[in-house]
Amino acid sequence: MWDYNISVADINAVFFGEQKLAGHYTRDKLFVKILETYPWFTILEIFTPQQIQKMLTKELIDSLRMPSLRNKYEFVRERLQKIIPATE
């Protein structure tokens, strides 16, 4: 993490479900931090659209601090739901 001493290995382990926490961050909190910090095209380099679709829930979007980001990612969530088939 860029503002805490958290290893990339711990962050990856949280995203892959091997750990619940990286430092004090849960998977959702890490994803929110990424959404609030990085531009969209960088996020697409980190995650696949399918991974984003899975993590980008209504509750997660509501936890974003800036209304403009909430609007942006609600639009992204709706679009991803239309173009990626639902998985079980």
Image: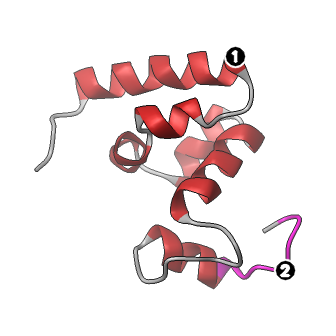
Q: Give the CA distance from mark 1 to mark 2.
A: 30 Å
Q: Which residue is mark 1?
A: 68
Q: Quadrant of the N terminus?
A: bottom right
Q: Earlier in the sequence, mark 1 or mark 2?
A: 2
Q: Which mark is residue 33?
A: none
Image side of residue 59 versus residue 85, left or right: right
Q: Secondary structure at mark 1?
A: helix
Q: Amino acid at mark 2?
A: Asn
Q: Check the image and report above or below for 15 versus 64.
A: below
On screen, residue 36 above or below 34: above
Q: Residues within 10 Å of mark 2 (few under 14, many from 20)?
A: few
Residue pointed to by mark 2: 5
Where does the magenta region start and end?
2-8
Q: What residue is rendered at 74% in x and 25% in y?
A: 66
Classify residue 8 as left or right of residue 6: left
Q: Residue at x 53, y 55 (%)?
A: 28
Circle 1: is it few (<14), some (14-19), or many (20+) Cα within 10 Å? few
Which quadrant of the structure image shows residue 56? top left
Task: State left or right for residue 32 relative to residue 80.
Answer: right
Quadrant location of residue 25?
bottom right
Horizontal and vertical percent for residue 10? 61, 82
- Provide the secondary structure element on which disc 2 rests: loop
Tell whether position 24 is magenta.
Answer: no
